[in-house]
Image (cartoon, rainbow, N blue to C red):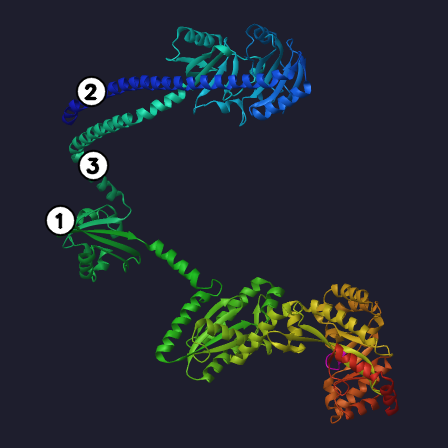
Amino acid sequence: MAGQEGIKPLKLLFTLLSVILLSALTVFSIALWDDVKTSQYDKLYKQNQTLISQSRSFFDHQTRLIVKTVQARFIDKKLQKRSVSNVFEYLLSATGEAAVFSLIDIKGKVLLSKGDINPPQLPSQNTVLENLKVSQTAQIGYLHRAGLLGESLLPFYVPILNKDKKIIAVVVAFYRVQGKSSLMQNFISPDNNTIWLLGELGQVRMSYPVPKGFVSDLFGWRLAQETASEIQYNLQSGKTKQGLELEVKGEQVLANVGYLPEYKLITLNSYPVAKLFSSWLERMRPIGIVFVLFLLAALLAYRVSLQISKRMSDAKQTAEGNVQKLSKAIEQSPDSVVITDNLWSIEYANSHFDLATAKPNAHDEARGHNIIDFPPYNVLTRDLKKISDEISLKGSWFGERKTDFDGKWYSFSISHITNPDDELTHYVVVVQDISSRKQAEAKLYKQANFDPLTGLPNRRRTNENLTRELQNAWKSKQQVAVLYLDIDNFKTVNDTFGHMIGDQLLQLVAGRLVKCCKGKAQICHISGDEFLVYATYDKIPEVESLADKILRNVEKPVLIEGKQIFISVSIGISCYPEDNNEVAGLIKFADIALFESKKDGRNRYSFFDHELDRRLKRRHTIETELRQALERGEIYMAYQSKNNIDTGHIMGFEALMRWNSSVLGPVGPFEFIEIAEEIGVINELGEFALRQACLDLIELQKFSDTPLIMAVNLSIRQLNDDSVIDMVDGVIKETGIDPSRLELEITESLLAENIEKLLPRLEKLLEFGTSLTIDDFGTGYSSLSYLTTFPVSTLKVDRAFVKDMVHNQGDATLTHTIITMAHALKMKVVAEGIEDEDQLAMLRDFGCDIGQGYLFSRPLIHKEMEILVETENLPNTRALNDSLT
């Protein structure tokens, strides 16, 4: 209360000072308002005098101009219309403000009009005409519009007198009051001012700018009676210089009025009071700012004084309150809080000290005892000296420890308290039970680093472990083998028995790997059915022995839920540092070697070599380039002739696809056809081959009198899809080839393995009129029953039998048997791979029908084959061949 008593005089002084300043500001503002109004009245007076002068000058000039130019056009009181029309055109060009000139008689009848718009329909003009007769001087009429939405026009009536000074006609000039070419361009209108031209009774003749909603001028709008009376009084009293306040069209304005007696015209120049108030505020602003700043400064001084007094009176209460809050916070804290002296003797412990030590009322009994006498603080016994030194340097220490007595994890946060001389006096120890967090961290670590199905390290953990293994091997100059394993046909097991059986199989394989590699290698589960094994070694036979042991242990059949499953794995092996010195490179190369093991029959291991890498990269390049080869025009067709065995004459061709890659160069069909089937572009290539072969056969036929046959191969991928039927039908119709000249070749193994599935499609293809040839006959299927049930027209003996039949009695016998059997079944036989005359002679003796091979022709492009066919069919060549036969 004493502090409050000391503030009262200051508060009284501040209030008195504020009242004095506010009174002074009020008096100043009133005086300033009177000054602003007086200054504005002076401006309005000067501006209105200018307006009177400009108005008189304009209308006097217009009167003289109209009278001078029109009066001379009357002869004996008779109107010369053509002449007056020309005058009006002159007046319109000389007076940009005028929109229309009209000539009326003294009765108001319109005699002639000229202008840019139609003249407005004037109401009764009797009053104006009567005034003209009396005064014989020009008169200003009411403001009108040219049509309902037209522009506003001000009529100006000028009498035309004869020599006897009598009115013989009246010229009415209609002046625009808005826009660039308007009457108002002759008058100065200062910013924010409105100027008015009024009749003696307040009728509006003109206003600029025109007020919003000012439509009533069509009916002779006038100012309010009260406003018009004030204007008349001001004019009659001779106080025009002083000005007056008016309400014009609902707006309060300061105004100055003037009078043109010759035109009975009142000029009114007005300025909005609201705008004047803005000017007053502008001038008041500096004074107001000074006043506000002074008031704020006084208020600030008052507030500072008040705060200083209050701070002094409340300081003790605040300190006591903070101590109480801190005490409550420490007591309610979920952590154990202990304060010791600089020798670690306990001076204070909160209630949670009991929970940490697992002793009731321990916090009361602990005072005076060393902190390391109580668990879990005793785990710091060995580190206490080290902790004290670190706190002396850094001011705090943090650590986590696991206790032996309860197996829990605790976090320790220790900081010091110093006196004003910066001497350490106390330690504050905060302990928290973090066992739950540690368990969660361990669980997360296990989830992030180990496969939940097999319990083996996952890919992420494998990379870390293998990296560490390579680092150790580099230091000790050892070698590391990386074995990449894949379970053979695992997808089949999943699809056949379900994923649950598949998971059990993975667990079983993982168990067998752990058992056979224990103490020798580390095992990881990479993903799906893939495992990784790595181990250090001295010599390669150690790696081979480990791989053999894995193969033997894994391939034992297993019984899962009553189902016996035979399993095996394929292994790819890479070696550090011989193959690569990085984890990613070793895994990649082991995966390449694994691909080789799969390719060579599975259940085996392969070591990586760089030739494998080269082949894999080439295969990848083929896959990439082959997708665009057709668009780039790199795929083309070659043809090998099929010749009559007896005469040697060309009977047809086999279409052979070729690829000349811009990146790889020539790529053989044995290399790219299989890849084309795998990546799904064989259908496009097959359609291209069939279409081009048909087109080229049509061209080749032009050079031969013998009907030629074109054989085109169909792949398994094409025949596995019904779209092949529409494709063949479409090509036949598009090219116009005779279907009977088209042979579709299919390999024996393909037909035998899929006969039930392919038979319906092949029958539909044969319905088009094409024929079917079995390629590579004798190399595949053991049962030949399909030959008797399926309409095969030609068998093609594989080159493997033809190659050695001259010197191999078994191949010769088999070839002879195939030919004899085919002929018995009404089929023709084509022998491929004929390279010498001995082979040809033997096939001729066996009764073979058609031969194909380098002895007749190597594969040729279309232009080369044209030359061959044309040469054979020349008369002399044909006769020579026949004679030799």
Give the mark, 1 or 2, whose residue is nearer the N terminus.
2
Q: Please say whether residue 606 is visible from this viewpoint.
A: yes
Q: Kindly identify which numbered label has been placed on residue 321.
A: 3
Q: Kindly identify which numbered label has been placed on residue 607.
A: none
Depth check: give the residue in front, 324 or 236.
Answer: 236
In percent of width and height, residue 392 lies at: 17, 57
Give the mark, 2 or 3, whose residue is nearer the N terminus.
2
Q: Amino acid at mark 2?
A: Leu
In percent of width and height, residue 841 lies at: 81, 92
Give the mark, 3 or 1, whose residue is nearer the N terminus.
3
Q: Residues within 10 Å of mark 1 (few under 14, many from 20)?
A: few
| SS category of the residue bearing label 2 | helix
Range of residues picked out in magenta: 775-780
Question: Which residue is painted at 41% across and 9% down in the image?
Answer: 234
Depth check: give the residue in front, 451 or 502.
Answer: 451
Classify residue 669 as left or right of residue 321.
right
What's the CA distance linking mark 3 and mark 1? 22 Å
What's the CA distance linking mark 1 and mark 2? 50 Å
Q: Kindly identify which numbered label has been placed on residue 419.
A: 1
In percent of width and height, residue 195 lies at: 46, 19
Q: Residues within 10 Å of mark 3 (few under 14, many from 20)?
A: few
In percent of width and height, residue 366 lies at: 18, 50
Depth check: give the residue in front, 155 or 319.
Answer: 155
| SS category of the residue bearing label 3 | helix
Q: Quadrant of residue 95?
A: top right
Q: Amino acid at mark 3?
A: Gly
Q: Which of labels 3 and 1 is toward the front?
A: 1
Question: Which residue is painted at 46% across and 10% down in the image?
Answer: 227
Query: Residue tagged by mark 2?
Result: 16
